[in-house]
Amino acid sequence: MELLIPSLSSVVSLTILGAVFGLLLSVAKIRLNVERDPRYKRLLDALPGANCGGCGEPGCAGYAFKILQGESDINQCPVGGHEVVERLAVVMGREVMPMVATKARVHCQGGSASALNKFVYDGPRSCAAAQQVMGGFKVCQWGCLGLGDCVRVCQFGAIAMGDAGLPVVNRDRCTGCGKCVDECPRSIITLVDESFDVHVMCLNREKAPVMKKGCSAGCIACNRCVKACKEVFSDDPDVDTAIQVIDFVAVIDYRKCINCGKCAEVCPQNVIEFTEREG
């Protein structure tokens, strides 16, 4: 009985302590409970639910929270576009903000027929993995490795590998979320304002004789595009044009580009792509 009495006392004490702590936690939950802003659910309902991260947040829930906190604008959802901006504006009681729609562009045309390999790669079918082996198997260190990491990460089916072994973007399906941009280990994919139809399909920064040892389809820095652009802008030889040759490769300044396509017409390497829209 002497051993039993202390045991019963311990059980009773623990039970009382448990009840007291439970009561305190219940009171604290009631006192400290913060009611969620009813606009939060409305914001979530207005968003597409893609959770692609294109807004800069991990998902739609995080983006909705940042909007409520005043830390994000309502025009940051590339998937939803202008329609979502309008819905978010209604929820937040704000004016509709303009949104620039972007599309992914691949800056490489060094496919299997044009670009040379410096060794045979027999590792995982991943660009990221291949890049870790001696900086990639392509002679051109800026060329697409063609193993499809961008294709696999695109949840909208907007990218597919073409016959040349290069990714091809379906502009109608592309939402501009930027997943492929983040995934590419060689940073050859960028997001460009969808209103522009001209872009340079090369990022090689070596002089033409060196570049041609690894790829026959790269920019040779001939400056013909710059001269053609000057004729459009001005007769002044010192005028800043919309295209410049920087580090031996043509670079377009989309803040100045008028989308005329003159640079593409004169490019001897067909490095500058221009797709004129109907109408």
Image (tube, helix red, strand yellow):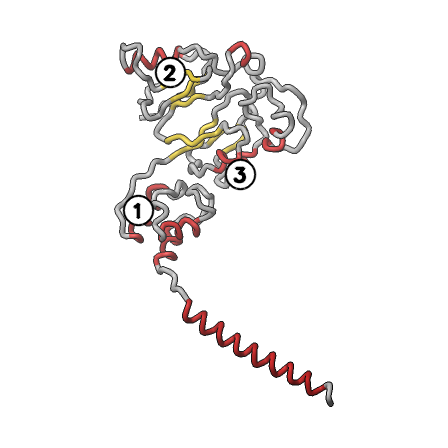
Dot 1, crowdedness within 10 Å: few (<14), some or many (≥20)? some
Q: In this view, does 72 lie above or below 121?
A: below
- Location of the N terminus by quadrant is bottom right
Could you say which is closer to the camera, residue 30 or residue 234?
Answer: 30
Q: Name the residue under label 3.
A: 153
Q: Which comes before the other along the chain, label 2 or label 1? A: 1
Q: What residue type is labelled 2?
A: Cys
Dot 3, crowdedness within 10 Å: few (<14), some or many (≥20)? some
- Location of the C terminus by quadrant is top left
Q: In this view, does 131 lie above or below 240?
A: below
Residue 181: image location, x then y, percent: 48, 33
Q: Which comes before the other along the chain, label 3 or label 2? A: 3
Q: Which amino acid does label 3 sit on?
A: Val
Residue at 45% x, 30% y is: 190
Q: In this view, does 28 lie above or below 92?
A: below
Residue 121, label in figure? none
Residue 263, label in figure? 2
Element at label 1: helix
Residue 86, label in figure? 1
Element at label 2: helix
Task: Say whether marks 1 and 3 touch (CB < 8 Å).
Answer: no
Could you say which is closer to the camera, residue 86 or residue 73?
Answer: 73
- Distance, label 3 to label 2, CA atoms, is 33 Å
Q: Quadrant of residue 56?
A: top left
Could you say which is closer to the camera, residue 219 or residue 110?
Answer: 219
Residue at 36% x, 46% y is: 72
Residue 78: image location, x then y, percent: 40, 40
Q: In which quarter of the image is residue 273?
A: top left
Q: Which comes before the other along the chain, label 1 or label 3? A: 1
